[in-house]
Image (cartoon, rainbow, N blue to C red):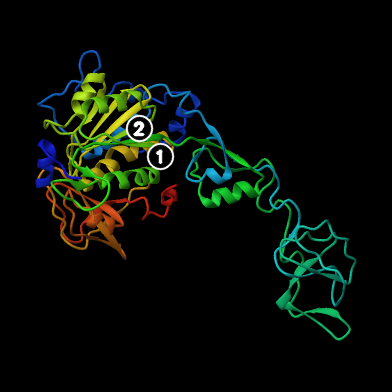
Amino acid sequence: MTARTGADAEDAEDAEDLDVEEVLALVNGDNGRTPADRTPPPQPTSPTGGHKPDTHHRATSWPEARAVAGRAARAGTRAARRAPVSVPLDTALGLTLAAPLTALTDLPSFDTSAMDGWAVAGPGPWDVRDEGVLAGHAEPQPLTDGEAVRIATGARIPLDTTAVIRSEHGRTDVQGRLHATRDTRHGQDIRPRGQECRSGDQLLPVGTLVTPAVLGLAAAAGYDTLAAVPRPRAEVLVLGDELLTEGLPHDGLIRDALGPMLPPWLRGLGAEVIAVRRLGDDAQALYKAITTSDADLVVTTGGTASGPVDHVHPTLKRIGAELLVDGVKVRPGHPMLLARTKENQHLVGLPGNPLAAVSGLLTLAEPLLRTLAARPAPEPYTLPVREEAHGHPYDTRLIPVVLRGDSAVPLHYNGPAMLRGIAAADALAVVPPGGARPGQELELLDLPWASAGIEVCFT
């Protein structure tokens, strides 16, 4: 998909971090606003709050655009839409805990063997019982002094056991008696009941991201379901009559790159994608799609400029949407926008050029979705750039980079219509106006599949 007119053509030439507890007020019916939030930033809106395009408006700076997107997700009343949900463990990955994870049992719930070997009582050598003790079996008979029994890792420790001797630290003589080849300490290789936690202990606080390890801990602590913040629901509207869904480009038609790319990317950002609609350049179809959508976030592709088939702005004006961000001082992606279309719904308008659309996703959609999902903000980090990074004279520039050791290497093929660079990238580097010299520290934005966090989960 390529940009066609207006600001998109110009583009081709050239979050606020929120406290998790504050964000979770959303799912408990509080609007989550702080006093500063009650006075919104200046908006190009009409006296009645509807959309009013301003031909002299000033584009929003890149950092402020991200902050606006994060704040926007907290505005309005979402008690019904953002109520916590109870989800089975196998569907909770990537969600945020809406209630503390409290142990429902002691861990371990009984004394267990930490190793394969022998449970022994008193000083050695020991007479070894014929039968062994296996994990998952009933409580074994107590031991008496001078007695040992074969035991498996995770099995219940017999009463009156002094220690567990590992298989490699014991030997039996010709009479079948067990001898320790190392000194034996009282309690060695025994995991006592409650070693990790006691029933009722808080294991994890509200706002914890559910990772695979969290799922394992929850299962061990006795949980079948978790109280979590529901995933924000997103709908993608693909605009443009020139787009093909299969085959090679021909006769002025091009392949749609955003239709296949955006849904998994949005899932990587924590959203549940409920629909992908291909509308072409049809103003009425766009109006109907937006006004009938029940998604938390509507994402449009292309049509954000002012050409004859760019219908996003006129449609937002027609429905009385509140325009929160109308253009961002960032390249690529300058003509992106953010609007509040309903009390509980926002629209992110992405430019039509693929890399410009990625810029819009990470600038506007990521902080909004993160706030709705009550995910913790990623810790910002910087790395020195290994080579010169060309910048825009006045705007922030986002460029794909690969991470090599302790530095970031800019990639070529980073024009607004190109995906070749971002397809090989680990992150996007935030280049300040004027560019960056070799060795200069730049902020990095991890890509969902390249980060070490849960965002690697796309389904």
Residue 138 placement (x, y as % from top left):
82, 56
Give the residue at x 16% y 56%: 389
Give the residue at x 71% y 47%: 106
Residue 255 placement (x, y as % from top left):
22, 48
- Specify few, some or many for label 1: CA neighbours under 10 Å numbering under 14, 14-19, or 20 or more: many
Left or right, 373 with reference to 420 = right
Give the residue at x 63% y 42%: 224
In the image, residue 204 sits, relative to residue 283, either above or below, namely: below
Q: Choose between 379 and 422: the one closer to the eye.
A: 422
- What number is the disc on residue 173? none
Q: Is residue 277 visible?
A: yes
Query: Dot 2 corresponds to which residue?
Result: 297
In the image, residue 153 sits, relative to residue 58, either above or below, namely: below
Distance between mark 2 and mark 1 Cα atoms: 9 Å
- What number is the disc on residue 271? 1
Q: Is residue 42 visible?
A: no
Quarter of the image containing the N terminus?
top left
